[in-house]
């Protein structure tokens, strides 16, 4: 006996594919958990649910920031990155901390906004997970009502961290057990992976739930978009300038750069192409932070069939020397990342040749 057609409607089934259910399905289908009831599966699913709650709270705040006293503008503080802190940065940072209190899941949170990891003592004896996050990335866009995002990465704590320095976090990106971002745009979209493909969920405000939108997203092998701040052209290595000259002289390329990483990356995930934030004269190591920006995005890109590179090595292989380490970033379609790398390798060959002759 099957349910009447009206009840077996696909859209109803999709609306019932909530994020937590999908995470459990993912973990079981990839044998990362024996059953949906396995503690690890329940933990990751619960963590993703808390991240989704943080996304809802931040989306709500952003949607009416212009109407709420002291929601916009600057606090007057400067963060560990040397950047002026926006009120929305502080709010979003606190939201992620709050949603994990009393959760028993996450003992430590490492954020772009905090010099040192934040410990939730009541969680620490049992909570074996660490959340690394950029609470609001691209916050310069907040006051002008353009898209911003949150980026997150989940790692398992290794050892007892008795000195409170969280040195076990200084490992490569393969230690990530989940990663993703929340894009606050015309709709709020959460994109995540637990190492079994990349999947997107759209917040249905009428339900207050993130509903499955796309499964197993694949970044095109090549795309027309190159996303980079060309105002830094004068600060780049010649190899990056060679790449930019190439796309300026060949048909089929289009420049798109919003100044907010998550939106630029999402465009490339959907349409193909490459995002670059190379090293500059002022920041030779680049501007973006590894542990909570470029490593989680590289995790997603590789899961979607794309690539993430510093230009000289895979972002997923980089071992940070400190919590807020920056790296150059080249992220996107495999062919386009490889094209950028080919210009870097060509210049290296020329330099080696010059050295021996
Ligand atoms: P620039 C925002 O401050 C951010 O961290 C990313 O979201 C963005 O991709 C980049 O910096 C923009 O930096 O130097 O081009 O303004």
Image: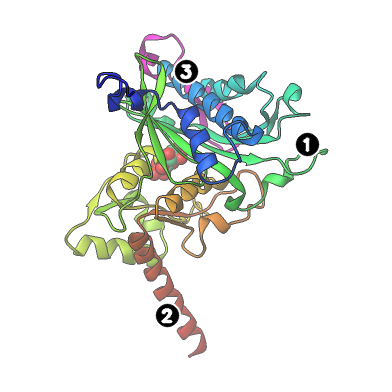
The residue where tag 3 is placed is 57
Q: Which residue is mark 1?
A: 164
Instruction: Evaluate whether residue 198 shows in this view.
Output: yes
* Residue at left offset 62%, top offset 49%: 175
Alpha carbon distance from label 2 to label 3: 52 Å
> In the figure, is residue 290 to the left or right of 168?
left
Q: Nearer the viewer, mark 3 or mark 1?
A: 3
Q: Write the residue at 51% across / 23% down.
A: 54
Query: Going by the picture, which residue comes out furthest to the right?
Result: 162
Structural crowding at the residue carrying mark 3, measured as other residues with C-alpha within 10 Å and reported as few (<14), some (14–19) or many (≥20):
some
Quadrant where the N terminus lies?
A: top left
Q: Residue at x 58, y 51 (%)?
A: 173
Regarding mark 1 in the picture, which secondary structure is present there? Answer: loop
Sequence-earlier tag: 3 or 1: 3
Residue 298: percent from the left, percent from the top? 47, 50
* Boundaries of the magenta span: 62-89
Q: Is residue 98 magenta?
A: no
């Amino acid at each position: 006996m099957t349910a009447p057609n009206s009840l077996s409607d696909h859209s109803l089934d999709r609306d019932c594919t909530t994020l937590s259910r999908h995470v459990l399905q993912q973990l079981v289908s990839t044998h990362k958990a024996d059953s949906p009831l396995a503690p690890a599966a329940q933990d990751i699913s619960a963590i993703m649910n808390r991240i989704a709650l943080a996304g809802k709270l931040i989306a709500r705040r952003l949607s009416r920031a212009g109407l709420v006293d002291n929601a916009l503008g600057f606090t007057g503080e400067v963060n560990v990155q040397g950047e002026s802190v926006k009120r929305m940065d502080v709010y979003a940072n606190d939201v992620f901390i709050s949603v994990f209190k009393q959760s028993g899941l996450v003992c430590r949170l490492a954020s772009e906004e905090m010099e040192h990891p934040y410990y939730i003592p009541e969680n620490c004896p049992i909570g074996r997970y660490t959340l690394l996050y950029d609470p609001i990335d691209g916050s310069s866009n907040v006051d002008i009502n353009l898209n911003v995002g949150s980026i997150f990465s989940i790692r398992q704590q290794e050892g007892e961290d008795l000195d409170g320095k969280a040195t076990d976090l200084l490992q490569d990106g393969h230690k990530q057990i989940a990663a993703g971002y929340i894009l606050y745009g015309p709709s709020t979209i959460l994109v995540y992976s637990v190492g079994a493909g990349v999947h997107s969920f759209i917040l249905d405000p009428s339900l207050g739930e993130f509903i499955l939108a796309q499964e197993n997203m694949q970044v095109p092998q090549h795309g027309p978009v190159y996303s980079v701040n060309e105002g830094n052209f004068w600060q780049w290595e010649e190899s990056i300038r060679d790449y930019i000259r190439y796309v300026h002289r060949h048909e089929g390329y289009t420049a798109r750069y919003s100044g907010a990483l998550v939106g630029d990356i999402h465009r490339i995930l959907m349409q193909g192409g490459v995002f670059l934030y190379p090293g500059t004269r002022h920041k030779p190591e680049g501007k973006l932070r590894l542990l909570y920006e470029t490593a989680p995005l590289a995790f997603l890109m590789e899961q979607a069939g794309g690539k993430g590179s510093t230009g000289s090595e895979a972002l997923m292989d980089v071992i940070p020397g400190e919590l807020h380490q920056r790296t150059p970033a080249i992220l996107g379609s495999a062919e386009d990342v490889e094209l950028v790398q080919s210009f870097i390798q060509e210049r290296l060959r020329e330099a080696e040749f010059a050295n021996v002759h």
